[in-house]
Image (tube, grey):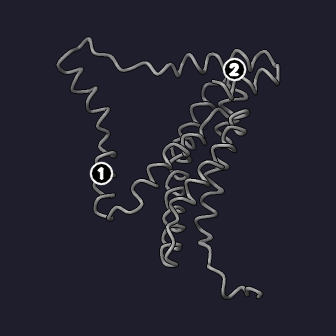
Amino acid sequence: MRQTIASKTPRIEVVDALRGFAVMAILLVHNLEHFIFPVYPDEGVFSVTFSLFAGKAYAIFALLFGLTFYIQYTNQLKKGKDFGYRFLWRLLLLGGFATLNAAFFPAVLLLFCVVGIFLFIVRKWSDRMVFILAIFLLLQPVEWYHYVMNLFNPAHSLPDLGVGQMYGEVAEYTKEGDFWKFIWGNVTL
């Protein structure tokens, strides 16, 4: 049976366009961050690019990731199906692609695989409960914990996640120019 254009589920083209702009901005930031930063002398270009694109592009992409899950989950729910397990399968596939992608851009997509599991967990929660959780997380309780701990104990320090050290390692093997070392370093780091 042929499916006509009129019977297809309409796409929200604005979402696709926004996703495209977000991916383009993320690629711009990654190109500067991972390919040019060890040898690029102008900190101004680096700062302006990050100020204009980095946080906004990641935020837009993350919001659209959640919106897309909501749309797919709701459409399947209308058909009497639970999209949650198919979404887990898709996260597993995304994990494979993210590992391949990590060869060139260190592991940002893997974060979506991990955080995507929370979408699976909360998919049947009421809108009110999801809203309360969102407000709680937006209040950044971990940051408040460190702030309060610092008030009572000035010697309290933030945990060192080793990000600076990792970027130093990336800079070193990028400067060497060995393609296979670059890929291995990105995948394992």
Disc 2 target residue: 38
- Which quarter of the figure has residue 31? top right
Give the residue type that dot 2 points to: Pro
Callout 2 crowding tier (Cα within 10 Å): few <14, some 14–19, many ≥20: some
Quick one: label 1 or label 2, which is nearer the N terminus? 2
User: Horizontally, is 51 left or right of 150 in the view?
Assistant: right
Quadrant in the rendering for residue 166: top right
Q: Position of residue 142 (x, y in %)?
A: 31, 33
Residue type, numbered disc 1: Ile
Query: Relative to 166, is 137 above or below?
Result: below
Identify which residue is drawn at 57% across, 43% down. 53
* Horizontal side, residue 159 vs residue 163: left or right: left
Q: Residue at x 32, y 16 (%)?
A: 157
Q: Is residue 119 left or right of residue 50?
A: left
Residue 151, horizontal then vertical, whole percent: 19, 21
Q: Nearer the viewer, residue 51 or 146?
A: 146
Q: Which mark is residue 135?
A: 1
Q: Residue at x 60, y 29 (%)?
A: 44
Q: Nearer the viewer, residue 67 or 17?
A: 67
Above or below, comparing residue 24 to residue 140 in the picture: below
